[in-house]
Each structure stands twice: as structure tokens, then as C-alpha cells.
Image (tube, rainbow, N blue to C red):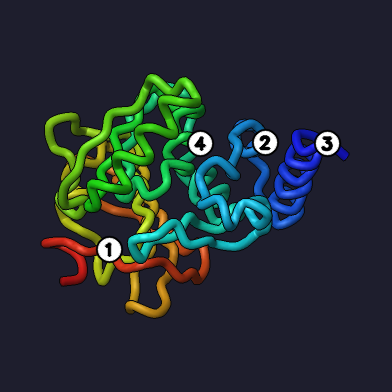
Amino acid sequence: MREKERIERARREMVDLIRRRGVRDERVLQAMLEVPRHLFVPLHLREMAYDDTPLSIGSGQTISQPYIVALMTEALMLDGTEKVLEIGTGSGYQTTILSRLCRWVYTVERLPELSKRAQESLKGLGCRNVSFKVGDGTLGWSEHAPYQAIMVTAGAPKVPEPLITQLAVGGRLVIPVGSQSHQELLRITKENDKGKLRRESLGGCIFVRLIGEEGWN
């Protein structure tokens, strides 16, 4: 079997597994089918790129498990018209998935080397609806607020208040909250302009720490 065919088969099998695990949004599944995850992992891990597992990308960071990527993306309930804020660019894989499902992605990364690498990866794939920033993601990106959806790809000790402030009325925030070793994945919906929030649990998870002024030290 040629390498290209092997990769495409592995990607289909990954998406089939995600579907069996309960993700139903066809737009999300199609994006996962189209985006080449193997281009976002180190060369020595590419044989594992389509396994349903997180992988190290260096600098103490990981690319999330494909099922978790799909689950969190589905939870944002995107229809293609939204401005989305992503906290934690990482490898840029989740960023690329989001870019195919919304109007514009604003993504913030604490580590300059990861942001630079992600920008190169997205440029190579022709993604043009993404803006990058290096900085403290726990403070959000106020210049472009409000956002109809916000995704945080690192575990927080609490929900950062700036992200709630920057969330549009009716908007959804998906974030892992808990201890440094285990978190609960939450979807928080801002129900009105007086700050009423609806919280839903999407299950347990384990993420790297969200470091910043409103996160871990």
C-alpha cells in the first residue's frame, strides 16, 4: 500500500472511531477527515498520528487526542458565521479544524516557538482566516471581542474572568477546569448580558496546565 493511501485509510479509521464514540456533527467529522494530523506531530511520532491518543509536540506541550478535539469542537456548536477565540494554539491542529468551521479564528499561544511553527503549518495548508498572537491566553484577546465561541485547550484552576467578559451573549465557552492532574470539561453558555451562565459537564479529561495571570502560576 502506498504511503498516501495508508495515511488516508488511517485518517478514515480515526474518524470512524470518533463517530462510534458519539460525535455526530457531520461538519466536524468532515473537517477531521480532511485535515492531515500527521503534519502537526514530530517526525518520529508520525506513525502514531492517527491513533486516538495525545502526542508530545515538544516544549512540554501536547497535541490533543483526536476524540477530545472533535468533542470540544462539536460542543462549540459552530455554524460557520462565528468569530472564535482559541486559547492555546499548540501545534495548530485544533486551530486548523476550527478554521474550516467558522468565519475567523483568533488564537493565542504563550510559547513563541509553538506559535511560529503553527503559523508555518497553517500557511502550508492555505488557512487564511486565522490571526495569531503570542501572549497570556488567560487574558483572552480583547481587541476582537466579543466572540461567539471560545475554546481553551489547557486545564485551568478556574474559569478566567476575562474570557467570560469577552464571550458574546449566547456564546459558548469550552474549557477544562480542575486540578493539575485531572479536569472536568465544561461548556459554559452566556445566557444574557447580566452575566447569567449555564454550565454543562462534558466529562472528565486531562490537559496540560493553563499558565497565566488567570490560570496556574
**Contact (CB < 8 A) between labels 4 and 2?**
no
First reached walking from the N terminus: tag 1 or tag 3: 3
Q: Which residue is mark 2?
A: 33
Q: Secondary structure at mark 1?
A: loop
Residue that appears at 23% across and 47% down: 112
Residue 79 in view of the camera: no
Instruction: Please tell me how crowded label 1 is: few (under 14), some (14-19), or many (20+) other residues with Cα within 10 Å.
Output: many
Q: Position of residue 204 (x, y in %)?
A: 50, 71
Q: How much space separates mark 1 and mark 4, taking CA atoms?
A: 21 Å
**Of residues 69 and 75, which is closer to you in this image?**
69
**Contact (CB < 8 A) between labels 3 and 2?**
no
Q: Amino acid at mark 4?
A: Ile
Q: Position of residue 41 (x, y in %)?
A: 52, 50
First reached walking from the N terminus: tag 2 or tag 1: 2
Query: In which quadrant is the N terminus drawn?
Result: top right
Q: Nearer the viewer, mark 3 or mark 4?
A: 3
Q: Which residue is mark 1?
A: 210
Q: How much space separates mark 3 and mark 2, taking CA atoms?
A: 19 Å
Q: Position of residue 83 (x, y in %)?
A: 33, 28
Q: Amino acid at mark 3?
A: Arg
**Of residues 94 and 80, which is closer to you in this image?**
94
Q: Secondary structure at mark 2?
A: helix
